[in-house]
Structures are given as C-alpha cells and as structure tokens.
Image: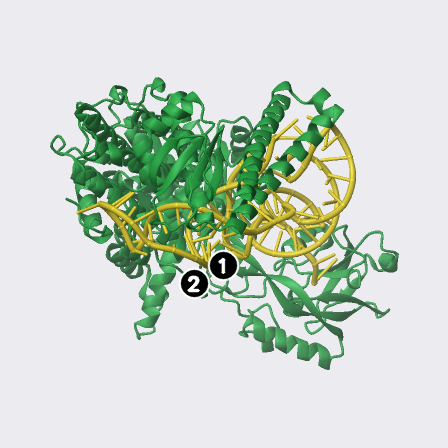
RNA sequence: GCGCAAUUAGCUCAGCGGUAGAGCACUAUGUUGACAUCGUAGGGGUCACAGGUUCAAUCCCUGUAUUGCGCACCA
C-alpha cells in the first residue's frame, strides 16, 4: 500500500538508477525500428544546470520518451561543449585567485592547458549528473565532448577541406577585439550598450593655412590615428576643400580631405574624420580611397594601451586615459571647439564587459556567404522547417547579410588551428605537423599557428561529428538528419545557422528536419534570470523542494509557442499538487482493489460510466499525440492534466463509488468496474510518463505485479480501437454531470447546508430522463446530497427549482428556504435567458444574416432560441409558484 | 531607423470568424476513509484603441499607442 502522502525525494534517485541500468536509453543503429534522433545542444562542460537547460532538456526528454514508447529507435545524443572563452576565463580567474598572481602567459601554454583539463575533469560531470536529477534519458553511453579525439579529427578535416576549397582563408581586416581577453570575438558576442558620452567637435587646420575644417567625434583619442577627413561629395560647403589637406591636431600629420557618400551632411559638421584602423565604417571609406594615400594607423596594443605610433607622451597610456589626455591637449592648443553630451551605442564584449575595440589583425575567416546559400535554400524549400515558423525570417535576415565568419580566437583552450608557417610566413594547412612538414619540404623550420578555432566551429559539426563522421558509420546512415533540433532563439545564429551550413556542405543533407525554437525562461516578473540580479531560480533547489516531476510538468505546461516562460514557484507548487492528487487517486484505487487486471481489455466494458471513461481516455491520448506532433507542449500537458484531475478524479472515481460499494450485488459489474478503473489508471501512467517519469514509474511498480524488470519507461505507447469511443455514453454521462453540477450549484446559491440531505422531485422528465434518473439514482443521491429522487409533477410549497434540459428539478426545502433570495435567483435566471433570446431575435430578424449565414448556423440559433425559451417558461412557472406560496 | 512578437479575469497565460477559457489568487462553504498539497460552489473580462472587410470580428486587414526582443546604426 502506498504511503499516505507522496514524497518525491524518496523515489527519484532510485528510479533513475534503474532506468539507466536498464539500457533503455540506448539507441540501436542496427535495429529495424525507425530511427528518431534529437541532438542535444551540448552545454558548457564545466557549467552547472540552470533553468534554461532544465526547460530545453525537459522538452527534449518528453519528445524522446514519447517516441521511444512509440517503438521508435530513439537516439538522444548527449554531450558537452568545451566553451572556449568561458572555460578559459574561469581557469584564468582561478589562477588569479590563487595568490601567486600567475597569468596563463606566465605559465605557458602547455602548463595552462593542463590546468584547464584538470578543471574539466573536476567539474565536467556536474551538469550531466544534474541532468540525471531532472530525469532525462539521453544515450549516455554515446556521450561526446567537443574536444574528444574523434570530434577534434572532424574539426581538422573540415578546416583542411574548406581551406582547400578556398572557403577558409587568412585575411587582415578589422575585427571586434576584446582588449581584456585579448582575442577577436564574433560580432554576435558584442552587445551594444547605450552610453551617455560626449561628442567633441575638433578643428583641423588646413595645410595651406587657408582656414580649417571641423569634425565631430566621440572617440577623440583616435584622432592620433586619423588618416583622412571625409565629406559628402554633394556638400557644397566643402566642395572647395576636397582634394586639399588638413593637419591632425596634436600629432600634426598631414591627411587628405576626400569625398565619400558614406558621410551624412546633416549630421554634426558634415565632415568626419577617417580612422581606418579603428572603425568599421572608416575602414570601408579607406578601401574606397586607397589611391589618395590614406595611412592605416593602428595606435593601440592588444591590451588597449597606446602604442609606438602615438606621440611619445601618449605611449603606454590606457585608452581611456589617453582620451582624457587628448581632450586636455586639444583644449590647450585651442582645437577643441565644442563638447556636448551625447547618448550613443558603445560595443561591449558580452563576456568581458569592456568596450570592444575595432582592431586590425590577421585572422582566419570562413566564407560564410557561400555556405549560407544552400542553408537558406533548405529552409525556403521546407527541407528544414522552423517551429514556430516566424523564426525563419530571423534566420533568413541573418544569412542573407552574413559577413565573413572570423573563426580564429587568440585563446589556448580549444582546437588549435592546423596550420604551420615557415620562416617566410608561408602557410601549410595539414592534419598534423608531419604532413605540414612534407608540404613544406624536409628541413624547413615550421611553427604552428597559436590560435584556436571559435567554439561554434566545432559545435557546427555536432550533428555529424558525434555520429562518427568522417567515417561512414551505421549511426550516420540511420540518424542523420536528425528529426528535430530543440533550442532557444538566442542561438539561431550562433549555432543553428552554422550547423545548417556545415551539415549541408559536408553531408549533402540538412542536419535536422525541424527546428523547434522555444522561448527563454524568465523570473516571475518577466526579467531575465541573472546572477547579478540575484533572481536566479536554481532548478536543483526546485527539484529538492517540489520534485523533478513538478518542475518538468511546469516547464512543459508553460511551453506555449512564441512566449517567454515566466516561472513562478507557485506554479510549480501547483503541479506538485497534481502529483499528489495522482498519488492519492492511485492509493484509493489500490484500497479498492482496482489494480490492473491483465486479462481485461477495454472492449469488455459494458457499463456506461466505464465505456464513457474509456472514450474520454481515447480522446485524451489522441489530443496528446496531436499536440506533441505540433510541438504544442503546453496543450499536451494540459490535456493529460485535465483528464487526470478534472475527469478521472473529479467525476469517474466518484461515479464508480456506488458500483464498488456493498450496495452493488452484481459481482460481474463490480469486477468490470474495478478492471476498468485499474486499466484506465494504468493507461494514465503510460500517457503521463513522458511528462512525469518518476511518480508514474513508482506507481506503475506499485499497482501491479509485472513481468520481471518491466519498467514503465520501456512500455509501448498505447493504440486503442477507435470504436471504444461512444457518443451515446458521452451524452448520457454529460447529462449526469450537468445534473449533479446544477443541483450543487443551486444548493450552494440558496445556502442549503452542505450536510443537509434533501428530497428531489423531477417534473416534466422525458422517458430518457426518467430512465437515467433511475440508473443513476445512487450516484445522484450521493454526489448531490439528495435523500431521494422522485418523478413527480407536484411542486410543494417552499421549493427551489431549477432546470436541466427538458426537466425541472424541484427541491422542497420549506424549512430553510429564503423566499426573497429564491425569487431574486429565479429573476436573475429569467433575465439572463431573456437577454439571450433578445440577442438571438435580433440576429434572426436581420435579413442579411438570414440570407448569408450558413444554414447550420441559422438552425443553431433557432434551436438555441427554443431552448432558452423553454427554460424561461420553466423558470417563470417556478417564480409564479413561489409567489403563490 | 528596420523587423518580429505581445496587449484577453487581480496575476500568469491559453484560445478562436458564430454563447469568452485554464491555473493561481479571491469569496463562501466543509458532507460519505483517496486526497485540506483537498472537496463543493461563487464573483470577476467593451478580449489595448481607432478604422475597415464580413450577415457576423476578441479572432482577418490597416493604422495608432504601449511593452518586450532582435538587427542596424550618424562620426
């Protein structure tokens, strides 16, 4: 027998161990079953589980468990990502905190990497063990890490192949440079922050002494690297100046004045300084005016200090100090004309939090625009489909305007670029040093490129590198392309788009057929969870407190398409209560001997309530299937919730109480009812299992003796014969529900004490109703707290009356009735009905409506009018009788 | 500036061309051994605003407002 209350903490670990030991997580590439594959977005190997993970992993696990139960050969491919910058930063911080003030450069590459590997070994299992707490069932045996040997081989091969195809190349261009981390970062890793800064207007004297030209800038320190001044070609104010030269204040360099359409005449002075090595737009101007002799001057070191290209007294200054200094100098030299407050966007590194510097460096690039074309085409043609569809626009916009992808990073943690240089700087791209040496020729001294690849470069290969590529494997055959990728919208660019590009290029086929994009998890107020805000809800604490099932179910129920998940603890508590409800219902079933009977099949049910609940279960199962098919997780969750609580517990178990009681001497019926209850309960556990795996597994084990080692998670998703649903049963039971609800409602309205048992007379009952009243006599008496149910057209004095369908229900309660109150209630009912009728009459009187509306709508209005009319008559009669009393 | 989404009950959100829904919260109440982590009943909405299409609009279209999120930015 089950304990009186459900304690999730007792059951969770125990079941997970059993599941994992059972081998049921494993995919079987050689089996004949149809494959179903989800590639888990690999979390940061040294990370810990946060709500975003819990959310996405829950949805994936629901899908995987569901498809596994449907007898598909499910592969949920798990793994972790080395997360280059993030992980390296953590270890560097640890070094700094050690007290020795060591930096990675002090340590040297090899020793540092050893440290990172140690850290990976130490904390690498954290997140995967936390995923186990959540109850997820990926094929752990296949777990991969982006820096595994196999995956690293794939990375090198892709690099080499793309290099040979000319799609990877080295180039000197401006990159987003993070002076703190001292690496290039992707423009996706740059966040623009609105900053209240200043705009400085600076006067540049003309070289010929004939006057001056003024420009505006927010970054006066870059004046030292100015290479030109640009004006709009049509700007008449400056026509005469184009072709002349100006003198850069402070450093006195002579620079040309050029005309370029990029300049907006109506902004500032209409003249702009061109600092080609420190601004993306300026760099473009520079390229268009190469013939004008514009110098390309880099004035900063990699860590954001002023370098040897600056005047002596600037060299070595931090970039922000240099700004202060130059403002002073300009003022002193009387070049500074104006300073105004100016709000503008400044790029910040999203990891380092410092302003990003456009910086001129040599980097490796991938020609993304070539790779993007087939990826775009694949989505346009529907080979890959986004759900919800509107994300396709985001995908298109980005890929259509894609820039060369800078794939090199000045980090140590990651895949080192497989390129070697000889002393002349000639590059040899090869799988290993020996091959590079062979290319270069014996005896040539080679040095390997020190940089590593962008983490997303290896993640882009994830859908096939994890399946054994470049080897031809049965896994690749069977599971590529994957069925669905489940991920958040925030990494459509970072990851989804790149997997599409690489997957199509190297596999000749899209990496997944569908991309389900979910929203972000926020706190109850809708704010993004972040450590600095302190509003982080830790999934593990929630699991401790409410159970993994409650968290999972909450996540699923909140996963409506296109909306963020605002997570509140109350909501989770609500679903914990749902688990308790199921627990107690099961306990009740056990107490009444309603355990699954394996000889019972639902077609054996004869009693209407039993046939009804079976039919309702059919609809529920169909609903869940449809909703999961459509990735409408919230609807799927609500469908089963509603069935379990609102249908099974609230009504069916109550309906069957009389049948199980001593009053029922029909043993066959009693047994059928027990069997039906046991069967439906068993089915509930199966249908609910993908959502709430722990409690359902526990109950499944508890309610029946099963074949040895039969785990619920390994059971087959049911198939029901459609004829098990019978509309006639539904009609009858819906009448019963209506009747019980109506009596309860009127009792409550009239303050009839809950404990009071009252008689009920039924007036104007049809034959069908008479029969039903007889059939459900006991249920009615029990559920509506009635002493007796009698067919009678008498209305005793002091009765309250109400109407269900054609019949009038009369409750003679002279001793407790409040006549005024009852009069008020009846008048209210009549008023409502009259209003309905009036509305319908208006419609029916509208010629256009009658002429244009479909016949069934008109018929519906007419029959609704008749119903309302009939009810109004009955209530009016009741009112008259009350007044006469 | 461009784009996307949202605006429905006190809160969080579903929904839908033909009688407005859920959970939580709230109010009242507590009857039978599954369940007070519960039962029963109830109150509560001009479906942001303005136009349009339609016999009919909360739903479709257009515009406005507000909010959120992307993308791009003028030095």
Q: Nearer the viewer, residue A884 or A456?
A: A884
Between A636 and A490, the residue placed more toward the observer is: A636
Instruction: Tell how many labels.
Output: 2
Mark earlier in primary sequence (1, 2): 1
**Placement of A118 over or under A728, stated as above or below:** below
Quarter residue A657 falls in:
top left
What residue do we see at 25% from left, 52% from top?
A125
In the picture of the structure, the residue carrying the numbered disc 2 is: A535
Callouts 1 and 2 in the same chain: yes
Instruction: Report whether A563 appears left or right of A543.
Output: right
Between A478 and A614, the one nearer to me in the picture: A614
Q: Which chain is green?
A: A
The Cα–Cα distance between marks 1 and 2, rounded to whole angstroms, is 10 Å
Relative placement, left or right, of A527 versus A760 is right
Residue A159: % across, % down:
41, 40
Task: Say which chain tag 1 marks.
Answer: A
Disc number placed over residue A622 in the picture, else none: none
- SS for dot 1: loop
Q: Colour of chain B?
A: yellow
Q: Position of residue A595 (x, y in %)?
A: 18, 33
Q: Which picture quadrant has residue A833?
A: top right
Residue position for label 1:
A525
Other residues around mark 2 within 10 Å, as few (<14) / some (14–19) / many (≥20)? some
Query: Where residue A805 sits in the image (x, y, percent)?
Result: 49, 29
Q: Is residue A575 left or right of residue A513?
A: left
Dot 1 and dot 2 residues touching (CB under 8 Å): yes
């Amino acid at each position: 027998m089950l304990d009186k209350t459900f304690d999730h903490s007792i059951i969770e670990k125990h079941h997970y161990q059993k599941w994992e030991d059972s081998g049921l997580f494993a995919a079987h590439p050689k089996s004949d079953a149809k494959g179903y594959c989800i590639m888990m977005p690999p979390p940061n190997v040294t990370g810990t589980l946060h709500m975003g993970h819990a959310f996405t992993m829950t949805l994936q696990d629901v899908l995987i468990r569901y498809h596994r139960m449907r007898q598909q050969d499910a592969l949920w491919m798990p793994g972790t990502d080395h997360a280059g910058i993030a992980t390296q930063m953590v270890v560097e911080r640890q070094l700094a905190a050690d007290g020795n003030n060591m930096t990675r450069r002090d340590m040297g590459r090899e020793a540092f990497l050893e440290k990172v590997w140690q850290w990976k070994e130490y904390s690498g299992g954290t997140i995967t063990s936390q995923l186990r707490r959540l109850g997820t069932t990926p094929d752990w045996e296949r777990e991969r890490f982006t820096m595994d040997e196999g995956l690293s081989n794939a990375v090198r091969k892709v690099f080499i192949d793309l290099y040979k195809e000319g799609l990877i190349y080295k180039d000197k261009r401006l990159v987003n440079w993070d002076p703190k981390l001292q690496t290039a970062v992707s423009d996706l890793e740059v966040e623009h922050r609105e900053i209240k800064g200043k705009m400085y207007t600076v006067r540049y004297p003309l070289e010929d002494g004939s006057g001056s030209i003024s420009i505006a800038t927010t970054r006066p320190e870059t004046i030292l690297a100015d290479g030109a001044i640009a004006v709009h070609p049509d700007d008449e104010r400056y026509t005469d100046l184009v072709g002349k030269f100006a003198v850069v204040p402070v450093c006195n360099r002579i620079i040309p004045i050029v005309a370029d359409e990029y300049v907006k005449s109506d902004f500032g002075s209409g003249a702009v300084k061109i600092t080609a090595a420190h601004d993306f737009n300026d760099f473009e101007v520079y390229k268009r005016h190469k013939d004008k002799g514009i110098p390309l001057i880099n004035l900063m070191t990699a860590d954001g200090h002023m370098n040897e290209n600056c005047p002596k007294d600037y060299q070595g200054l931090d970039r922000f100090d240099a700004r202060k200094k130059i403002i002073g100098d300009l003022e002193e030299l009387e070049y500074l004309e104006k300073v105004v407050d100016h709000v503008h966007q400044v790029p910040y590194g999203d990891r380092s939090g410092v302003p990003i510097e456009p910086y001129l460096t040599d980097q490796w690039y991938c020609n993304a625009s070539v790779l993007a074309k087939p990826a775009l085409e694949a989505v346009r043609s529907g080979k890959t489909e986004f759900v919800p569809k509107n994300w396709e626009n985001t995908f298109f916009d980005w890929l259509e305007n894609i820039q060369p992808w800078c794939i090199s990073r000045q980090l140590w943690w990651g895949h080192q670029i497989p390129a070697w240089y000889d002393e002349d700087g000639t590059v040899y791209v090869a799988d290993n040093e020996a091959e590079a040496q062979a290319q270069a020729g014996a005896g040539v001294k080679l040095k390997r490129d020190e940089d590593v690849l962008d983490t997303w470069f290896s993640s882009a290969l994830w859908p096939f590198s994890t399946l054994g590529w470049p080897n031809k494997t049965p896994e690749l055959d069977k599971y590529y392309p994957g069925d669905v990728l489940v991920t958040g919208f925030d990494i459509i660019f970072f990851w989804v788009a790149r997997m599409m590009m690489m997957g199509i290029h190297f596999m000749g086929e899209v990496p997944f057929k569908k991309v389900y994009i979910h929203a972000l998890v926020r706190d109850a107020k809708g704010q993004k969870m972040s450590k600095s805000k302190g509003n982080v809800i830790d999934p593990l604490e929630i699991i401790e407190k409410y159970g993994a099932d409650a968290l999972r179910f909450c996540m699923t129920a909140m996963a409506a398409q296109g909306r963020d998940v605002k997570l509140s603890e109350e909501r989770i508590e609500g679903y914990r209560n749902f688990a308790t409800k199921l627990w107690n219902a099961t306990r009740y079933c056990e107490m009444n001997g309603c355990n699954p009977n394996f000889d019972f099949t639902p077609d054996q049910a004869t009693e209407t309530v039993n046939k009804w609940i079976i039919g309702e279960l059919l609809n529920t199962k169909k609903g869940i299937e449809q909703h999961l098919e459509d990735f409408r997780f919230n609807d799927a969750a609500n469908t089963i919730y509603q069935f379990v609580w609102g249908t099974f517990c609230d009504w069916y178990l109550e309906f069957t109480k009389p049948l199980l009681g001593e009053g029922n001497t029909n043993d066959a019926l009693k047994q059928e009812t027990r069997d039906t209850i046991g069967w439906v309960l068993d089915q509930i556990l199966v249908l609910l299992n993908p959502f709430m795996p722990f409690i359902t597994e526990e109950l499944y084990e508890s309610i029946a003796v099963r074949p040895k080692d039969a785990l619920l998670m390994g059971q087959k998703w049911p198939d029901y014969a459609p004829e098990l649903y019978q509309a006639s049963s539904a009609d009858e039971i819906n009448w019963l529900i209506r009747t019980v609800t109506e009596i309860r409602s009127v009792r409550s309205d009239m303050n009839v004490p809950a404990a009071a048992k009252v008689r009920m007379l039924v007036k104007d009952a049809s034959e069908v109703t008479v029969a039903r009243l007889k059939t459900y006599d006991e249920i009615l008496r029990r559920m509506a707290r009635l002493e007796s149910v009698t067919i009678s057209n008498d209305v005793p004095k002091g009765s309250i009356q109400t109407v269900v369908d054609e019949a009038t229900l009369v409750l003679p309660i002279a001793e407790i009735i409040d006549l005024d109150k009852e009069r008020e209630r009846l008048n209210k009912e009549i008023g409502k009905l009259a209003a309905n009728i009036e509305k319908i009459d208006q419609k029916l009187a509208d010629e256009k409506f009658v002429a244009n509306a479909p016949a069934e709508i008109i018929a519906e209005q007419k029959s609704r009018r008749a119903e309302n009319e009939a009810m109004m008559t009955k209530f009016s009669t009741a009112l008259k009788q009350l007044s006469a009393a």
